[in-house]
Amino acid sequence: MKFFIDTANLAQIKEANDLGILDGVTTNPSLMAKEGIQGKDAVMKHYVDICNLVDGDISAEVIATDFDGIVAEGKVLAALHKNIIVKVPMIKDGIKAIKYFTDNGIKTNCTLIFSAGQAILAAKAGATYVSPFLGRIDDMGMDGIDLIQQIRHIYDIQGFQSEILAASIRNPLHIIKCAEVGADVCTCPLDSILGLLKHPLTDIGLAKFLDDAKKFA
Ligand code: E4P
């Protein structure tokens, strides 16, 4: 399973990348706004800064919601850097645009997926990545992991090539569950990635080893 970090914060991206386990980055307009990035030029520069930090797939989201607008914006984003993945919302014109991008060699991430039907359409259009938002499904009192599992099953029996990019991750258990059910990618906040490191028995065990090591130092 690939690990992406889900943030536009450069310090956090660098910290995750320095671990040596990072395969890419996802952003969205809310994450960009959270970093105080304002204006089209600043947004474009920020995407390039991220590409210069991480050698992996970097999702950059379009704002337009009509076919012509999505295509125009997507072309500008894709031209910024070879690693840019154009992130397109799961709407009717979004599906049309994903098919256009697929036919023209531009990689895409279909975002805001909340059902198996949406995931089927995105795969049919040739999306490189399909992003089910499992945390937001959990927030509704349903189980987001069930959706990841259902999409995995459908893609496997139908031979769809899109990669399942589990998004809206809230905690380390989400990451473990995504690995169990066969997500291709997990995009996670830094805290959830670092949470995987933790176990009290590791801390206790290391303290004892270091203490015993003093006896023969
Ligand atoms: C995915 O690409 C999105 O940026 C993200 O995972 C959304 O997560 P949220 O539900 O925490 O906003």
Image (tube, rainbow, N blue to C red):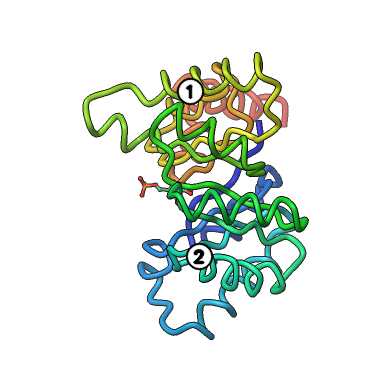
On screen, residue 170 above or below 24: above
Along the line of sight, the residue nearer the viewer: 112 or 208: 112
Label 1's element? Answer: helix
Q: Amino acid at mark 1?
A: Ile
On screen, residue 153 above or below 71: above
Name the residue: 49% across, 51% down: 6
Q: Nearer the viewer, mark 1 or mark 2?
A: 2
Q: Are marks 1 and 2 in contact (CB under 8 Å)?
A: no
- For disc 2, the marked residue is 62
Name the residue: 69% across, 59% down: 54
Q: Residues within 10 Å of mark 1 (few under 14, many from 20)?
A: few
Give coordinates of residue 164: x percent, y percent.
58, 33
Label 2's element? Answer: loop
Along the line of sight, the residue nearer the viewer: 3 or 89: 89
Q: Which of pointers 1 and 2 lies earlier in the amino acid sequence? A: 2
- For disc 1, the marked residue is 204
Task: Please indicate whether residue 118 sits to the left or right of residue 183 in the image.
Answer: left
Give coordinates of residue 59: x percent, y percent.
59, 57
Along the line of sight, the residue nearer the viewer: 174 or 107: 107
Name the residue: 58% across, 27% down: 183
Name the residue: 43% across, 23% down: 147
Image quadrant of residue 113?
top left
Q: CA distance from mark 1 to mark 2?
A: 48 Å
